[in-house]
C-alpha cells in the first residue's frame, strides 16, 4: 500500500510534465489540425535554456526562489521564440496544402532542431547538481517510508498554477475566445475581423512556453539531459494528448496524468525495461474502445 | 525603390536579427561543457554574431530584391517543367533509368564507394516503393514502417543462423513473417482515422524496437546478431578459398578473386528486388484490390456504400507493404552480416516516409528521385559528419515549403469513369 502511494506520487509528478507538453500538441492540433512533431524538440530546447540559465544564476548566489522565477521566465521567453520561428518558417507557408505536407515539414524541423542542439551543445549528456533537497516523509512507522520531495511538490504546484492561468486565458479573455473561434472555423473567424495568423502564432508561443516549463521541471527532476530527450517525451506527450482526446485541453492534462501513472506503475510492478511499451499498448487499447480518446468530441463523418 | 521601403526593410531585418539573437544566443552562445564535477559555460559569442549577422544581411537582401518571390517562380517553373517532361516521357525515363542501373557497376568511374552508396539508395528505393503501397495508394499514414523492416531483418537473421538455410529460402519466409506482423498489427488499428493511425503505427515501431533491445534470449539485445550468412550465387559462395571439393564463385567462372564480385552481386540482388516491388505495384494498381485502395484513399464513405470492406482492403495494403519491407530487411541483414536494434530507429521510418511524400505520393519515379536526392545530400555532407542531418532535415522542410505536393505529384486515379479528361 505504501509502495503504491509512493508510485502514485511519482506518477503524478511525471504526469504533470507530460501534461504540460501535451497541451502544446493538443492546441496546435485543435487549431491547424496537424501533428507538430517538432514540439518534443521545443521541449528539449526549453530544458537546455533552463539548464544554461541555472548554471549562470547558480554562480551569482541569489536565493533559490528568485533563481527559479528568473529561470522560468527566461526559459519561457527564449523557447517561445523557437516555437514562433518554427511556425513561421516551416508551417505557415504550408497552410492550406494537403494534410501530409506540414507533417513532413515538422519531421524535418524536428531533425534539424535535434542536430542543431547536438552541434551547438555537444552530444554528451549534461548533468546538473540538484537544487532541491529534502522532502516530507509519511508512514514513518511502516516498513516502507513514503517520501514526497519538495521538488515533487514544487512541480505539481507549479503545474496547477500554470493550468489555472492557462484555463483563465482560454476561457475568459479575448485571446482565448479568438483561439477557440479559430479552432471551430478559421474562415468565419477571419471574416469577423480576427487576425488568424496572429492567433495561430500566439498558440505556438503559449504551447512552447508551457513545454519550456516542462523542460525546466525535467532538468530539475532527472538532473540530466541530452539532445535526444525531446523524442521520447514528445511521443509520450502526444500519446497523452490522444488518450485524453485530441483538441481537448482538460483531456491533455488528464491524458498526461494517466500516461505518467501508467509508466510509473508499470515500472514499479511489472518491468522497468518495458515501461515505454506500456504507454503505447494502453494507447492502442484505448483507441480501439474510445476512438476519439476519453474527453474528445465524438467524430461524426459527414458526406 | 522608395526611401521608405528601404527603411522599412531595414527595420524588418533588424527585427530578424533580434529574433536570431534570441534563438542563437543561449543555445549556440553559451556552450555547456563538463569540467571535473558539474558543468561550466564556455561562451562562443563570435559564432553567434556571425549567425545573427548572416540572418540580418540575408533578410535585408531578400527584402530589397523581393527575391523571395522571383526565387519561388524560378524554382516552381523549373520543377513544373521537369515534372511535365518526366510525365510525358515517363516510359523513356524509366527505361533509361533501369538501363543505367544495369550497366552502373561496369562504368569506368564506379568504385567500391559508389557501389555502396548505390546499394544504399536502392534499399531506400525499395523501402519507398513498399511504403508507397500503404501511403501513396491506400492513403494510410504509416510512421512505423521500420518495424516490418526490422521483423524481416531479424527473422532472416534468426532463421539463417539457427537452421543454416540458404538466402533464397529465408527471403520469402522473412517476407511472410513481416506480412503476418502487418496483419497482426494492422487488424486492431486500421479502423482509426489518419492521424491516429500515424501515431499508433509510430508506437508499434517503438514497441518492436524496445522488444528487440530487451528480449535477450532471442535477439541478443543491444549487441545484435552477428555472423549472418552472406548470400551465395545459386549455391556458389563468394569465398577467397573455398572448402575442399567446393566450388566458389571465382573458381567456377575462372575469375580472379575480388571482393567486388559480392558487392556487384548484392547490387543486382537489390536492383531485382526493387524492380519486382515496382512491377508488382504497377500491376496491382490495375487489379480490383488496387482500384479499391485508390478509391478508399479518395473517399472512404463512398467506398463503404459501394460494398468495399474498408478494413480488409486496408489490411491487404498493410500486409503487402509490410511484406516488401520484410524483403528489404532480409537484404539488409545479409548485406551487413550484422544487425542490431540501432539500425531500426524512428529516424529510419521518418526517412522512408519522407522519401514517399517528397517524391510525390503515389509516384514511383518520385520515390527514386527523392531517394537519390536525400541519400545523396547526406553523402555529400559526409565529411561534415555533424551537419549532415541538419542538411537532411533542412532539405525536407525546404522541399515541402516550395513543393508541398512532392517532386512529382501523382494523385491521379489510375482509372476514371469517362476516360482521362484533359
Image: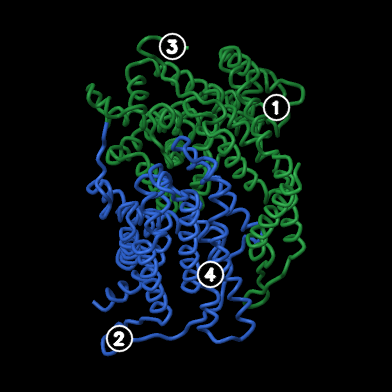
How many numbered circles are shown? 4
Relative horizontal placement of residue B139, taking residue B188 as reference (left or right): right
Relative horizontal placement of residue B146, taking residue B69 as reference (left or right): left
Residue at mark 1: chain? B
- Residue at coordinates 40% horizontally, 63% vertically from top-left? A18
Residue at mark 2: chain? A
**Residue B257 - label:** 1
Q: CB atoms at circles 3 and 4 under 8 Å apart?
A: no
Instruction: Identify the hue of chain B.
Output: green
Q: CA distance from mark 1 to mark 4?
A: 53 Å
Residue that mark 3 sits on:
B420
**Where is residue B189 shown, x and y percent of the image?**
30, 41
Residue that mark 4 sits on:
A224
Is circle 3 on the same chain as circle 4?
no
Is circle 1 on the same chain as circle 3?
yes
**Where is residue B125 shown, x and y percent of the image?**
54, 29
**Can see residue B205?**
no
Against B335, is B84 above or below? above
> Are there few (<14), some (14-19), or many (20+) residues within 10 Å of tag 4?
some
SS for callout 4: strand
SS for callout 1: loop
Instruction: Identify the hue of chain A.
Output: blue
Which numbered disc, 2 or 1, marks the residue closer to the eye?
Answer: 2
Residue at mark 4: chain? A
Q: CB atoms at circles 2 and 1 under 8 Å apart?
A: no
Q: CA distance from mark 2 to mark 1?
A: 75 Å
Q: CA distance from mark 3 to mark 4?
A: 60 Å
Residue that mark 2 sits on:
A138
SS for callout 2: strand
> Are there few (<14), some (14-19), or many (20+) residues within 10 Å of tag 2?
some
Q: CB atoms at circles 2 and 4 under 8 Å apart?
A: no
Amino acid at each position: 500500500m505504501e509502495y503504491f502511494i509512493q508510485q502514485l506520487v511519482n506518477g503524478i509528478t511525471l504526469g504533470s510534465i507530460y501534461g504540460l507538453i501535451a497541451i502544446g500538441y493538443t492546441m496546435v492540433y485543435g487549431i491547424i489540425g496537424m501533428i507538430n512533431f517538432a514540439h518534443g524538440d521545443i521541449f528539449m530546447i526549453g530544458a537546455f535554456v533552463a539548464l544554461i540559465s541555472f548554471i549562470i544564476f547558480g554562480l551569482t548566489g541569489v536565493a533559490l526562489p528568485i533563481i527559479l522565477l528568473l529561470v522560468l521566465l527566461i526559459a519561457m521567453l527564449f523557447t517561445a521564440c523557437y516555437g514562433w520561428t518554427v511556425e513561421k518558417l516551416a508551417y505557415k507557408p504550408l497552410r492550406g496544402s494537403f494534410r501530409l505536407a506540414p507533417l513532413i515539414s515538422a519531421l524535418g524541423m524536428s531533425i534539424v532542431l535535434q542536430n542543431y542542439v547536438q552541434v551547438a551543445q555537444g552530444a554528451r549528456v549534461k548533468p546538473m547538481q540538484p537544487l532541491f533537497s529534502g522532502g516530507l516523509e509519511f508512514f514513518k512507522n511502516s516498513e516502507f517510508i513514503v517520501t514526497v520531495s519538495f521538488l515533487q511538490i514544487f512541480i505539481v504546484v507549479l503545474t496547477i498554477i500554470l493550468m489555472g492561468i492557462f484555463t483563465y486565458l482560454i476561457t475568459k479573455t479575448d485571446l482565448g475566445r479568438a483561439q477557440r473561434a479559430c479552432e471551430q472555423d478559421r474562415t468565419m473567424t477571419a471574416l469577423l475581423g480576427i487576425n488568424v495568423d496572429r492567433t495561430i502564432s500566439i498558440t505556438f508561443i503559449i504551447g512552447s512556453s508551457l513545454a519550456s516549463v516542462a523542460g525546466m521541471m525535467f532538468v530539475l527532476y532527472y538532473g540530466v539531459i541530452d539532445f535526444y530527450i525531446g523524442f521520447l517525451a514528445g511521443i509520450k506527450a502526444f500519446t497523452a494528448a490522444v488518450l485524453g482526446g485530441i483538441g481537448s485541453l482538460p483531456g491533455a492534462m488528464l491524458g498526461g496524468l494517466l500516461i505518467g501513472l501508467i509508466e510509473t506503475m508499470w515500472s514499479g510492478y511489472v518491468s522497468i525495461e518495458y515501461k515505454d511499451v506500456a504507454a503505447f499498448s494502453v494507447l492502442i487499447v484505448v483507441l480501439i474502445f474510445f476512438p476519439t480518446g476519453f474527453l474528445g468530441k465524438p467524430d461524426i463523418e459527414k458526406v | 525603390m522608395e526611401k521608405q521601403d528601404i527603411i522599412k526593410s531595414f527595420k524588418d531585418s533588424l527585427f530578424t536579427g533580434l529574433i536570431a539573437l534570441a534563438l542563437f544566443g543561449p543555445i549556440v552562445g553559451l556552450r555547456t561543457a563538463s569540467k571535473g564535477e558539474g558543468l561550466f559555460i564556455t561562451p562562443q559569442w563570435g559564432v553567434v554574431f556571425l549567425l545573427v549577422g548572416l540572418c540580418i544581411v540575408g533578410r535585408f537582401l531578400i527584402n530589397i530584391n523581393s527575391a523571395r518571390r522571383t526565387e519561388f517562380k524560378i524554382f516552381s517553373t523549373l520543377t513544373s517543367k521537369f515534372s511535365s517532361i518526366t510525365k510525358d516521357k515517363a516510359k523513356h525515363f524509366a527505361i533509361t533509368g533501369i538501363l543505367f542501373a544495369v550497366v552502373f557497376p561496369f562504368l569506368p568511374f564506379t568504385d567500391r564507394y559508389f557501389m555502396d552508396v548505390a546499394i544504399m539508395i536502392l534499399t531506400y528505393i525499395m523501402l519507398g516503393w513498399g511504403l508507397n503501397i500503404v501511403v501513396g495508394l491506400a492513403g494510410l499514414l504509416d510512421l512505423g514502417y521500420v518495424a516490418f523492416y526490422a521483423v524481416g531483418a531479424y527473422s532472416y537473421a534468426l532463421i539463417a543462423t539457427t537452421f543454416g538455410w540458404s538466402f533464397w529460402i529465408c527471403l520469402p519466409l522473412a517476407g511472410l513473417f513481416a506480412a503476418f506482423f502487418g496483419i497482426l498489427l494492422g487488424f486492431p488499428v486500421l479502423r482509426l482515422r489518419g492521424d491516429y493511425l500515424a501515431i499508433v503505427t509510430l508506437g508499434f515501431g517503438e514497441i518492436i524496437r524496445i522488444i528487440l533491445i530487451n528480449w535477450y534470449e532471442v535477439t541478443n539485445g543491444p549487441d545484435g546478431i552477428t555472423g549472418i550468412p552472406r548470400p551465395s550465387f545459386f549455391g556458389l559462395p563468394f569465398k577467397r578459398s573455398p572448402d575442399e571439393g567446393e566450388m566458389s564463385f571465382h573458381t567456377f567462372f575462372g575469375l580472379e578473386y575480388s571482393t567486388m564480385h559480392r558487392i556487384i552481386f548484392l547490387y543486382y540482388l537489390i536492383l531485382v528486388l526493387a524492380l519486382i516491388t515496382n512491377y508488382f505495384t504497377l500491376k496491382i494498381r490495375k487489379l480490383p484490390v488496387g482500384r479499391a485502395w485508390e478509391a478508399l484513399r479518395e473517399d472512404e464513405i463512398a467506398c463503404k456504400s459501394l460494398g468495399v470492406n474498408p478494413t480488409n482492403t486496408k489490411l491487404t495494403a498493410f500486409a503487402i507493404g509490410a511484406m516488401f519491407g520484410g524483403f528489404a530487411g532480409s537484404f539488409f541483414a545479409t548485406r551487413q552480416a550484422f544487425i542490431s536494434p540501432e539500425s531500426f530507429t524512428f529516424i529510419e521510418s521518418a526517412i522512408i516516409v519522407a522519401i514517399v511524400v517528397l517524391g510525390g505520393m503515389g509516384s514511383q519515379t518520385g520515390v527514386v528521385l527523392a531517394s537519390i536526392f536525400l541519400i545523396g545530400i547526406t553523402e555529400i555532407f559526409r565529411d561534415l559528419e555533424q551537419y549532415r542531418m541538419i542538411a537532411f532535415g533542412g532539405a525536407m522542410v525546404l522541399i515541402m515549403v516550395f513543393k508541398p505536393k512532392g517532386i512529382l505529384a501523382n494523385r491521379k486515379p489510375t482509372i476514371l469513369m469517362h476516360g482521362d479528361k484533359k
